[in-house]
Amino acid sequence: MGRQRVKLYIAYDGTDYSGWQIQKNTDATIQQHLEEVIGEYDPEFERIHGACRTDGGVHARAQVAHFDMSVDIPEERIALAINGDLPRDIVCWQAEKVRDSFHSRYQARAKTYRYRIDNGEFPRIFTHRYTHFQYQPISLVPMKEAARYLPGEKDFSSFKAKGCSSSHPVRKIYGAEVYSGPDEEIIIEITGSGFLYNMVRIIAGTLIEIGLEKRESEQMEEIIESRDRRAAGFTAPACGLTLEKVYYSEDFEQFFA
Amino acid sequence: MGRQRVKLYIAYDGTDYSGWQIQKNTDATIQQHLEEVIGEYDPEFERIHGACRTDGGVHARAQVAHFDMSVDIPEERIALAINGDLPRDIVCWQAEKVRDSFHSRYQARAKTYRYRIDNGEFPRIFTHRYTHFQYQPISLVPMKEAARYLPGEKDFSSFKAKGCSSSHPVRKIYGAEVYSGPDEEIIIEITGSGFLYNMVRIIAGTLIEIGLEKRESEQMEEIIESRDRRAAGFTAPACGLTLEKVYYSEDFEQFFA
């Protein structure tokens, strides 16, 4: 048979991994585990391409990836086949046969990330791997106010970590919400065309400092305008961050048209 | 100062531990971690006593333990002090100074355990450590029917694993419920005076076989009456089990009077 492009939806607990992307000095990447498993089924398999290069410790509910498959597996069996051989903290939960022109990264129109803060007095044990624990009480209202400055097409250099390989610091934020979840959780949810290196974590850290009343919510405007990393807050830890969704043309128009 | 007995409430993610109780061949026990931390504060500290000897891989939301403290720490600071030095997957979330006659194990009147089954098509990544994944659809109604045979003071030898050190197989079950949780979870909740070795996991395995229609719900009565381990179902994996609550006289009368 010829080659068939396949789109995968992948969830992972990133705690014990060095991130999505294959690296020279470690075997502990999501991409490497997936490639090993797919390679077992398909002798001609070459590479899997992920929509987002999530960092070490960052989780995903619905990372999207694609690869070209040269063995004949019915669409509804692909995810089950791959999933059977993955470690328990990586789950391939859906697979679709797609047109050859589909590209998980280049065609991604937007991404939603969620940053979860456990704001209880003591860490909740059943979410401790997926939240950043912050025992000082955080005020939701100033965080909500500050988040209103984020949407729009802007130069986000203030939230760009050193080592960012992108030459263009302009990104479009479609939505930025802060809300309270169950069990004293505070959730920051940001949807954008793309994100600079550590951008969501630096925004989360800045919003946390505003919630702790170390900064005023109105400062968010100046921070963005300064285009200076030193104006923004700390980089919130990776454990609180989850890639929630990747949007392609179909989904994108449904949500943002 | 003299000695002050302290009651602790402890939560843990048991995945990476060999259970509560200190063992010769491993450092990975909850008790050992707690003893090391308390020993740092209190040079005269000897031993911490837990209400339940949870097995390897079993979790706790509210394990109770006690120890005698010979240093002077205000009640409201004890949990914070202990918690600060524990690994992230063990949390001491409350401490109370109690009368010297209090004993976490001998005075426990009842315990509630919960067994969580992820019955989705693919494992949910953010609960995978705390649930048993079972992709074949489980029917709730026969499980609910079967659970009705459990309450009462009975000989539960059928649900006793080999190696159980207890000479008396009679326990009193106060309540046994099966209900559906969020995200395609099925939850088995059992409250009893005490439990034989692996009793909750064998009951869970038997209920799962009933939910899979490998057995009829009415068989539960015969299984109990047989007093024969071979009559019951498989031992469900430890990862799905959580110790939810330990009841002492005050709580007990509130719930079961």
Image: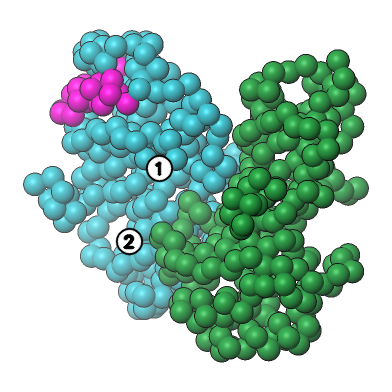
Chain colours: A green, B cyan
B92 in relation to B155, above or below: below
Please provide the residue range marked out in magenta. B140-158
Residue tagged by mark 1?
B182
Helix, strand, or loop for circle 1? loop
Residue type at numbered disc 2: Lys
| Residue B218 x/y as whole percent | 23, 13
Q: Is A24 on the left-hand or right-hand side of B208?
A: right
Tell me the tag on residue A13: none
Residue type at numbered disc 1: Pro
Q: How many marks?
A: 2
Magenta segment includes A153: no
- Whichever of labels 2 and 1 marks the residue nearer the N terminus, that label is 2
Q: Quadrant of residue A169?
A: bottom right
Helix, strand, or loop for circle 2? strand
The residue shown at (49%, 73%) is: A135
Name the front one of labels 2 and 1: 1
Q: Chain of mark 1?
A: B
| Residue B64 x/y as whole percent | 34, 53
Neighbours of disc 2 within 10 Å: few (<14), some (14-19), many (20+): many
Tell me the tag on residue B7: 2
A256 in relation to A215, above or below: above
The residue shown at (70%, 48%) is: A249
A236 in relation to A14, above or below: below
The residue shown at (40%, 42%) is: B182
Which quadrant is the N terminus of chain A positioned in? top right
- The answer to whether residue B240 is visible is no
